[in-house]
Image (cartoon, rainbow, N blue to C red):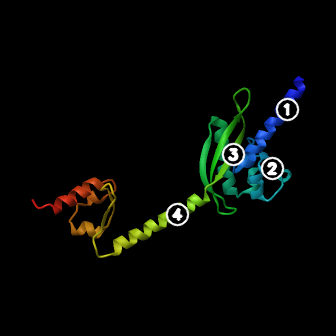
Amino acid sequence: AEHKQAEDALRESERKYHSLASASDSMYLVDRDCRFLLVNERHLARFGLPAEQVIGRKHGEFHSAEDAVVFENYIRQVFETGEPHQDEYRSARDGRYFVRTLSPVKDDNGMTSSVTVIAKDITERKRTEEALHLQEMQLRTILESTGDGILAVDNAGKVIKTNRRFADLWKIPSDLVKKGSDEALLTYVLGQLVDP
């Protein structure tokens, strides 16, 4: 009966593992030498290879030499410190962006025996951020190239945009134009509008 219970518990544990592994983004387990011990289906799909052609091989066999060195350094860090590490990187394979979390797997003595790596695809978020950054740069170019002085405030009265022409027209001191001087800038401008 005890043997049967142990087998049932093992099967249940395996079902939970497979459920977790298939539900996450790329997930894999590596040893100190960066050899793949386990790889989930999502990560195998990125390689386009079956598990038997990946398990036992080194991470560097599937990545550029530069990427392999960076990864090996992170793995070494996790083994030495026993602490997790997280970084953001762009895959040279397909240009997609990932947040990669490396977590130590510890043995009964509390020593790191392997490292679990979960890579979450953040490509769409990065593309949105890049598009917003481009729009911000375009808006800044328009603001600075116009001959008009522009000051924009939000509903709370906080200065959100201004241009150099506006500062020149109102003879605003340069230190008030710097980032973080919004309240002082607005106070200065309003003060100029009030008839003493």
Mark 4 highlights which residue? Answer: 130
Judge depth for marks 1 and 2 and give the one in front.
Answer: 1
C-beta proximity under 8 Å, tags 4 and 2: no
Q: Is residue 29 visible?
A: no
In this picture, is 179 found above or below 4? Answer: below
**Mark pair 4, 2: CA separation:** 35 Å
**Mark pair 4, 1: CA separation:** 50 Å
Judge depth for marks 1 and 3 and give the one in front.
Answer: 1
**Mark pair 3, 2: CA separation:** 15 Å
Residue 183, image x, y percentages: 27, 53
Q: Residue at x 49, y 64 (%)?
A: 132
Residue flagged by tag 4: what amino acid is it? Glu
Mark 1 highlights which residue? Answer: 8
Is tag 4's residue or tag 3's residue first in the polypeptide sequence? 3
Residue flagged by tag 3: what amino acid is it? Val
Residue 62, image x, y percentages: 75, 56
C-beta proximity under 8 Å, tags 1 and 2: no
In this picture, is 56 found above or below 187? Answer: above
Q: Secondary structure at mark 3?
A: strand
Seen from the viewer's position, the closer of residues 146 and 57 is 146
Q: Residue at x 70, y 48 (%)?
A: 24
In the picture as drawn, the residue positioned furthest to the left comes out as 196
Residue flagged by tag 2: what amino acid is it? Arg
C-beta proximity under 8 Å, tags 4 and 1: no
**Mark pair 1, 3: CA separation:** 28 Å
